[in-house]
Amino acid sequence: MTNLTSQAPLQDLHDAYLADTRRNNLRWLGVVFVFLFLVFLFSWIAEVSPLKFWKNIGNFNSYIDRIFHLDSGDWVVLHPAEWFWGFKKWFLLMLETILMAYVGTFFGCLGALVLCFLASQNITKSKTAVFICRRFLEFSRTVPELVFALIFVYAFSLGPLPGVLAITIHSTGALGKLFAEVVENIDMKPVVGIVSCGGNWWQKIRFGVIPQVLPNFASYTLLRFEINVRGAAVLGFVGAGGIGETLMTAIRRFYYSDVSALLVMIVVTVMLIDVATEKLRHSMMEKESLR
Amino acid sequence: MSTLNLNEHDANLKEQFPQYFATFSIARVKTLFVLLALLIVLVIGIHQLEIKWDRIFTGMQRLGDIVILMFPPDPGWGPLFKSYIDAMVETISIAFLGTFMAAIIAIPLSLLAARNTNLHRLLQFLSRRTFDTLRGIDILIWALIWINVVGLGPFAGVLAIICSDVGSFGKLFSEALEAVDKNPTEGIQSSGGNRLQQIQFGVIPQVLPVFFSQILYFFESNTRSATIIGIVGAGGVGFILSEQIRSLEFQQLSFVILLILITVSLIDLLSARLRHALIQPH
């Protein structure tokens, strides 16, 4: 008797559960179907052929094998001096790459600092100024760095200068957006307090906004620097300075052991900068949380 | 009278909180030193990279000329227009295939790298370093290497995106797996669920939304990357861009850049919507 009364609602629940899972499964089936369709369509457009891949995957293995062997046929690690024969030249180029990233990040950060206040609704009252500023930032971060570099190389001639400018513009756009988001999320009470005591625009920014946003700004800038080092390493592909040009020549002309040496240098540098900036950011955040 | 009161008030405040009125403090000196060091590196950089005013000035003039030449954007109606659209579709295909194949490869590999799914320390360490190396090499460099293997064309671009993204996804996915809350798994175990059921009902519902939003986010960013890998010959709209700059067809160039901007923002919009639709029900 008790069994019957408790069974009926349970049965309903069970049916509802089954219906629900069935609906859910059908939805997922639909998603998978659309997804597979897209995969086949796009594979056809992008000329992806598994056959070609299987035929050539041996090439990839032998390529990797070859870049780790010297012309004499020896394993590169056995003769480090011969492997890194151009170390002095490459090291200077790597330094140039890092400097390009540094100068570009510096000026990009300055540009973002100026524009982020104009792009924040809570600081700038003029809606048109905010709109124009935001579209400008959007434009400069959506056009890829390398496209800017291509155009700048034509205008400023070959060398690191067009690379630095490309990094600057791209960083202004990327940092400007992030900075503006930070500024829009600040506590407005200090700002209102300064304005009500008769503070002007500069005092409002300096004493009301900056103290609240500085840690975040610094953290984002460091992150951007790291990204820019990676970016600067390939700007040389279009002639905009740094180590990229040497690397491209090595890959295109099949200087096998040079390719691996340059790749090792780039990867190690990027990892070191990665670790260093992360430590710096953590130490800054700790200081912030101690306050 | 009132000014006198105010002055008195100020004096009181100064007495109470001397640290806020000091003009000299260790912290300030430190900040100044950091700023000075940053500026010195900047000056060295400007000197070493041969950034000079006259070069910037003449370059800006030429840049101004180029910008004037860019207007109005010329869609090159006819076969040219069709080739631009085709190249853009190819770009999206490269990004799509690269992102999703990388995700499919990275999911099992991330199980190797996560602390809670793989107890083998050495394998964990090796898979993590592999991810780091894959990520440390830029997509463009991967593209150049794959061109040597499969030849020029979009397939090399797809493989380049896969290589670089397996590194990023592996890291992000293994971090998501490590952040999984153990309580649901233990609950399923205590009510008699086996290992597979624990994963199906305890782990997957937690990580799936994170995986999805990461994949969509990377799809967005890969669309941007796919527009430039054509510059080295790995398919997509980048090849057209570099050709137009080389042959100084600036009106067409500005149209293609416009096309890229529109496509990228459309994909941003679409993926934001999809992300909300996929994540909200959970």
Image (cartoon, coloured by chain):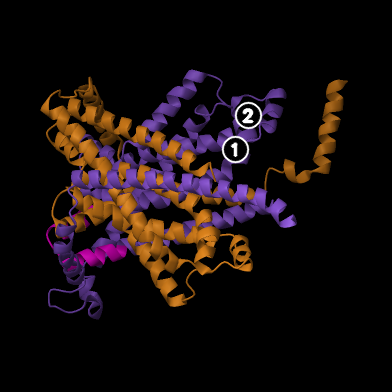
Chain colours: A purple, B orange
Query: How far from the left and from the top, in percent, is residue A179?
Result: 51, 38
Q: Is residue A270 visible?
A: no
Q: Give amino acid for label 1.
A: Ile
The residue positioned farthest toward the front in the image shown:
A1
Numbered circle sitting on residue A204: 2
Left or right: B148 with respect to A191?
left
Q: Nearer the viewer, residue A251 or B26?
A: A251
Against B166, residue A73 (above or below) is: below
Tag 1's secondary structure? helix
| Residue appearing at x 72%, y 51% in the figure | A5
Stretch of the chain drawn in magenta: A241-265
* Relative to A83, residue B33 above or below: above
Across and down, in percent, residue B104 comes to 35, 57
Taking depth in this image into account, of A117 and A48 the one nearest to the observer is A48
Does A261 appear in magenta?
Answer: yes
Query: Sequence order check: which comes first, mark 2 or mark 1?
Result: 2
Chief secondary structure of the magenta portion: helix
On the image, numbered disc 1 is attached to which residue?
A210
Decide: is A290 above or below A139: below
- In the rendered structure, the answer to whether residue B30 lies left or right of residue A83 reads right
Q: Quadrant of the N terminus of chain A?
A: bottom right
